[in-house]
């Protein structure tokens, strides 16, 4: 079941949150199990299944990393558990940040990560909400690189906030 199709939205890496919220409310009204109390058992099961799918899709589309991952998965560019090789220059920069954290230096790290993330986003921002019928492999690979770098940065932020 394709979550984009459930929500009747374009397949984009990031989803317009205001559109998503409005669609979610409508879908909840249409498939909430409470509205199927007097229905047949198969109708109740279908409504329960759709309600669960709507909730799962909403959770994915509300989270930037999950949304990008889902997009890449349906485009056949991301495999669950895939090992992605990040560029050496990025890893060296991350090593410097991790060393600061190992030394107990937290001041300025969050701002440094935000600046790196902003710089990374500039490379992909034009495509993140772009509606495209056929995505070129090059663009998908750039979005994939952004996804794995952002995922790495989020792990550092999680470590920072522990």
Image (tube, rainbow, N blue to C red):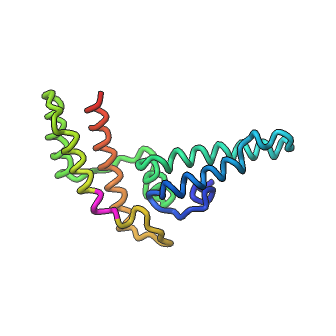
**Position in image of residue 119 (x %, y %):** 23, 56
Q: Residue at x 60, y 51 (%)?
A: 24
Is 96 situated left or right of 69 in this image? left
Residue 160 highlighted magenta (yes or no): no
When the figure is inspected, residue 140 is found, relative to residue 107, above or below; the finding is: below
| Secondary structure predominantly adopted by residues drawn in magenta | helix
Camera-nearest residue between 28 and 87: 28
**Position in image of residue 160 (x %, y %):** 25, 32
Give, as a single range, the part of the protein colored magenta: 121-125
The C terminus - image quarter? top left
**Position in image of residue 113 (x %, y %):** 23, 45
Q: Residue at x 35, y 62 (%)?
A: 141
- In the picture, residue 55 is in which quadrant? top right
- In the picture, residue 106 is in which quadrant? top left
Camera-nearest residue between 72 and 29: 29
Is 143 situated left or right of 27 in this image? left
Counting labels gives 0
Q: Residue at x 82, y 39 (%)?
A: 37
Camera-nearest residue between 144 and 158: 158
Q: Residue at x 33, y 62 (%)?
A: 124
Residue 122 highlighted magenta (yes or no): yes
Is 112 situated left or right of 30 in this image? left
Is 46 situated left or right of 39 in this image? left
Camera-nearest residue between 135 and 160: 160
**Position in image of residue 13 (x %, y %):** 44, 58
When the figure is inspected, residue 144 is found, relative to residue 101, above or below; the finding is: below
- In the picture, residue 153 is in which quadrant? top left
């Amino acid at each position: 079941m394709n979550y984009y199709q459930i929500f009747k939205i374009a397949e984009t890496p990031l989803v317009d949150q205001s559109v998503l919220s409005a669609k979610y409310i409508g879908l909840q009204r249409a498939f909430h199990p409470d509205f199927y109390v007097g229905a047949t058992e198969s109708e109740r099961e279908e409504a329960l299944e759709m309600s669960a799918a709507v909730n799962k899709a909403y959770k994915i589309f509300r989270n930037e990393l999950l949304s990008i991952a889902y997009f890449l998965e349906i485009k056949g560019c991301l495999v669950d558990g895939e090992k992605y090789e990040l560029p050496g220059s990025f890893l060296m920069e991350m090593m410097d940040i991790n060393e600061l954290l190992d030394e107990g230096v937290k001041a300025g790290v969050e701002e440094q990560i935000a600046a790196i993330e902003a710089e990374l986003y500039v490379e992909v921002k034009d495509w993140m909400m772009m509606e495209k019928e056929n995505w070129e492999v090059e663009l998908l690979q750039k979005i994939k690189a952004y996804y794995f770098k952002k995922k790495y940065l989020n792990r550092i932020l999680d470590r920072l906030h522990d």
